[in-house]
Every structure is written in structure tokens, then in C-alpha cells.
Image (spheres, grey):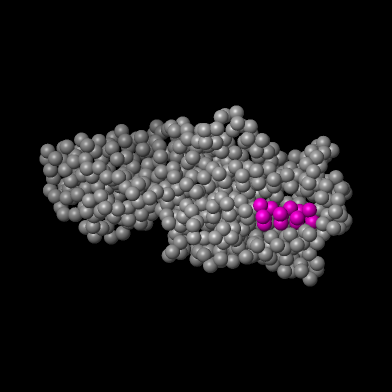
Amino acid sequence: MVQHAVAPGHADSAAPEATLPESHPKVSVWTLMMGAIGVVFGDIGTSPLYAFKESVAAASAGGPVTRDIILGVLSLILWSLVLVVTAKYVFILLRADNRGEGGTLTLVALAQRALGKRRGIVLVLGIAGAGLFYGDAVLTPAISVLSAVEGLKLATPELDPYVVPITLTILAALFMVQSRGTGRVAAFFGPVMLAWFAALAVAGLLHIADDPTVMFAMNPVYALTFFHNHSAVSLAVLGAVCLSVTGAEALYADLGHFGAQPIRRAWLYIVFPALVINYFGQGALVLAHPAAAESPLFRLVPDWALLPMIGLATLATIIASQSVITGAFSLTRQAVQLGLLPRLEIRFTSETHQGQIYLPRVNMLLLFGVVVLVLIFGSSSNLSHAYGVSVFGAMAVDAVLAILVIWKGWRWSLGLTLLVMLPFLFIDLAFFGANLLKIFTGGYVPVILAAALMTLMWTWVKGTSILFEKTRKIDVPLLELVKMLEKSPPHRVKGTAVFLTSDPETAPAALLHNLKHNKVLHEKNVILTVRSEDVPRLEDEDRVRIEHVGDSFWRVQIAYGYMETPNIPRGLAILRKQGFKFDIMATSFFLSRRSIRPAAQSGMPLWQDKVFISLAKSASDATDFFQIPTGRVVEVGTQVTV
């Protein structure tokens, strides 16, 4: 459980409050499957644009493209899809839900609950997983859109110099429309992606007959034989083959949106068959025409269908980019709610669906990162060297957290847990290690980005902990203050005063300053703490707790799940059902605005103190964040050192 309050030490927000029901009784499985096809599978669904091409290029290393290379690469891709996506994510991790929600931070919440107080390693893993995801969020739009637009060179070679400008234009437009919401566009995601998967399957089927022996690649022996015969390039090939399963983590992250069954069926009945057929079609084409290895996907279609295929591919890559952008928004809200980041401005882009959100600062940083990557690398082949490190680092984190959840949470024996999960962890680490070979040719990008974000998150967690402990030492116990005020009561004024604090055991600084300078006390005084629970959502009857601690004083705790948005007035209104009269127009909210200075002796290095202070200053306004009416807020400034 994490406690938060208005002080820069904590922040409180998460994903939507009434967005995603925990069950879908009124929505057909087919409708949910269509939604999943449009949102969940965008990233992995666009992998055929570059995965097979880059794998063959890595295997041939500039030499001839031989039969054993094609069959070996295809076998590696097929069994990666079977083991990493189908076995690990579809059949195992989709079962590790927290009241219907999934994702890395859901695994963190489940592992924290299972381990009790021993949460340090879990928190570190969560920070690592979140940092690596942001690397993926920057790379996916860049490589996806760039690989689709590069198809224009096949139609008209004269357009080659315009590939990067066109890509940047599409990406800029994509990020600019984020502030308007994705509700209307999302309605087209499912049909467009369904058309994309149909096109992949048809294009592949048309060419498998070019060399039917390509079907031999279904035998995993070809994958093992490839490693034996091509040991010199095996790690480089593995670093390219992994591109075929990027986006697998989205199956689990979007669990709360669609439910396990629709995602599972969409993968097994539509997405997986379409991908396999297309990869095998690409393989058969290259076996028959080795020159097609330069751009096998677009060579699958006849000349008259090339431009429509490029257009459809571009739409598919935009959808893939959209899903990872909204995923970054959602992850950021969860990270804020769990105390890993300071408060950030959140804008709702739909009056009826609170899940549609926009975070201006995150959007701006993602756009900046994507533009820089496209300008630096210039092609999807170059960008493929940067892709993979962050993806499989995050997947390895998921596997470790899953081991903790299955062992402690599901009560499996340690031996059985390791027997099931260690092979998947080994595969993730093998892919991760293979991608580390590309560290100097582009892999440094997600490593640097993830390291910077992990440093920021760890600094925020450590700084808030130090700040909390320092202020607690000089604070006055609340019960002592209440007894003192009962013995010598100050002048009373009408109305209710709500004082927000992160520690309900001590008197808030705003209350002490109000007594010291104004020398008055309201008729009703509420000491309010906002808490984050390790569940996605709470029912109203479990949200608010109230305790009468003395004459005119009440201690109130309002709890929110990590997928909810705090709304203090609405939370306090629940108290009316418990007999506590609350009138928002007769209530003043007292917030402590802390000015933080670096201390001579601190628990962190000076540079980290300065980073923490900068993060605290960048936190969004608490009034807007907690959705408190601006006309009812009184801010009291205090100065503290960290």
C-alpha cells in the first residue's frame, strides 16, 4: 500500500475510474475480439514489414541467401511466436490478472501483495520494466511508420529522398491529434487491422506454392540445426528474429480492456495464423527468387496492389504507434499512482469514457524522441539495431515478476514454478543478450533512455521517502494537538476545513500554520489522506474510511486503485451515506505547498537532490490533480530540506 498526499513527496493518479469494466456481460466476444485486433496486436501485427527481412540479412551477412538460412530463420520465427507469445503470454500471463487488469505494474502490485513487506526488489523490477517500456514506446512509432513508407521506393525509386520527410510528417500529425482523443479513430482500428491481417494471409498464401518445401520449417530441428551450422552469426540472427515477437507484452498489458478470452481467441484464430502464413509466404518467395530478400513483404503483392498495400501498411503502423502511445499514457498514470513519478497533468479527451486521456508532457517527450530517432537512423534497417533491447528487457522483468506471483501468490511449489517459467526466462534473456550485441550500432538508444528514466523514478521514490521521514521527525502528533485544542480552544469559524496530508498520525503543516497565523479553527476539521491500493479499482463502499478523533476533528482516508483517478470532492460526498454532513460550498481545502532545498547532509548525492527538487517543481498543480474546485483552496507555503 502506498500513501500519497499533496506534498511533492507523493502524487496520486492512475488510469480511468469508470473506464474498463471488470467483466463484459453486455458485449459480445466477437466485438471484443475486433477491439483487441485493432488495439492489442498493432505492434506485433506490423512485424512482417521488417522481421523476416532483417533476420535473413543478418543470417546471410552479405553472402548468398541459401535454403538452410531461409528454413532456419522461418523455424526460429515460428517457434518464437509459439513459445514467447502463445505459451508465455497467451496461456500463462493472461491468467495473472489483478481484478481483470494486466501489465508490468499489475505484476508489481500482485508481487507486492504476495510478498508482504519485502517489496524492495519488486519495486526495483517495476521501475526497470517501466523504464524499458518507454524505450519501446519511442522506438515502435519510428521503426513501424518508417518501414511502411519505405515501400514507396519500390513503387517509385524517385521518392527515396522523401521517405524520411513523409515519415516525419505522418508521425508529427499522429502526435498532434492526441490531444483531441482517439475515440473516433479507434472505431476504425479493428476493421483496418482485420483487413491488414487478411491481406497478410492472402499475400502469403499466393506464394507458398512458389516452393512448398518451405513448410519443412515447421520442424524445430531446422532452428537447432541453424545454430549449429551458423554459430558465427547465430546471436546476430537471434537479435533480428526477436523483432517478430515485439508487441507480445501488449497482449497482457491490455487485458483489462478486452478480457483474456477475446484476446486469446483473436490471437489463436486470426492473428497467429495470418502472421505464420505471411512469414512462410515470404520464405517461399525468397527461396524461389533470392533477389526478393531486399523487401519480401511488398514483393508478395502484384504491381497493381503495391500502392494499396503500402497505404494499408501505413495505416497499420499508425495504429501500432497509437496503441503504444496510449499505452505510455496509461503506464505513466499507473506509475504516478504507485508513487514512481510526480504528479503530471492529465486531460480527459472524452466526456463519457475516462480511459481516453492525454498527457501533454509525455506526448511532447515521445514526439521529440521519435523525431530524433528517425533523423539519426534514417531507415528501418538501421533502427532495427536499436529495437529489441528494451522489449526483451521488459519481457524478462515480466518473467521474473511472474515467478514471484505464481510461487507466492498462486501457492505453487517453487520447483514447479521454476520448471514452468525458467524456460521462458531463458528465452527472454537469450533474446536480450543477442540484442546487446547491437549496443554500439543503435542498441545504446533504449539503454540510455531506460537508464535515464529508471534513475528519475528511483530518485523520486528515494527522495519522497527521505522527505517523509524528515518531516515526520518535526511534526506534531495529531492526537496530542487535538487534546491541546480541547483544553484551550481557539476562535471558531463556520464551515468545514479539509487538510490534506500523507501521514494521518501527525498534524498537517497547513493546520499548524493556520492556527499560528490566523488563530482560528473551523467547526469541522477533516484530516484527509489519499491512499493508493494494489488493486485496479475499488467499490464506493470500500473507498472511504472515517474516524472521529476528538472534538470537531475527523480523520478520513480515501483510497483509489492504481487504475483510478482521484476525485476528492466525489470521495468526500460518499461520507454523507455514513452520516457525515458535507457541503462543498461551505468547505475550504488547505494544501501545503512545500519549497524544497538541498540539505548539507542528505541521504542522496547532491546531483540526485537537485534532480528530485526539479521533479518536485515540475509536478502538476494539486488542485487540478485532485479535482478540487479552485475557489475552495487555500495554499500554505512551507520550506523543507531533503
Nearer to me, 276 or 54: 276
**Residue 592: x, y in percent?**
30, 47
Does the magenta portion include 280? Answer: yes
Nearer to me, 547 or 415: 415
160 shown above or below 102: below
Residue at x 82%, y 57% (from the top left corner): 208
- The span picked out in magenta is 268-282
**Residue 481: x, y in percent?**
20, 38
Nearer to me, 560 or 382: 560
Residue at x 45%, y 50% (from the top left corner): 563
Residue at x 75%, y 56% (from the top left corner): 278
**Residue 199: x, y in percent?**
72, 63
Labels in figure, total? 0
Considering the image in quadrants, where does the C terminus appear? top left
Residue 367 can be seen in this image: no
Does the magenta portion include 141? Answer: no
Q: Residue furthest bottom?
A: 304
Instruction: Quadrant for residue 228, please give it.
Output: top right
Residue 525 can be seen in this image: yes
Considering the image in quadrants, where does the N terminus appear? top left
Q: What kind of secondary structure does the magenta stretch mostly adopt?
A: helix
**Residue 369: x, y in percent?**
59, 54
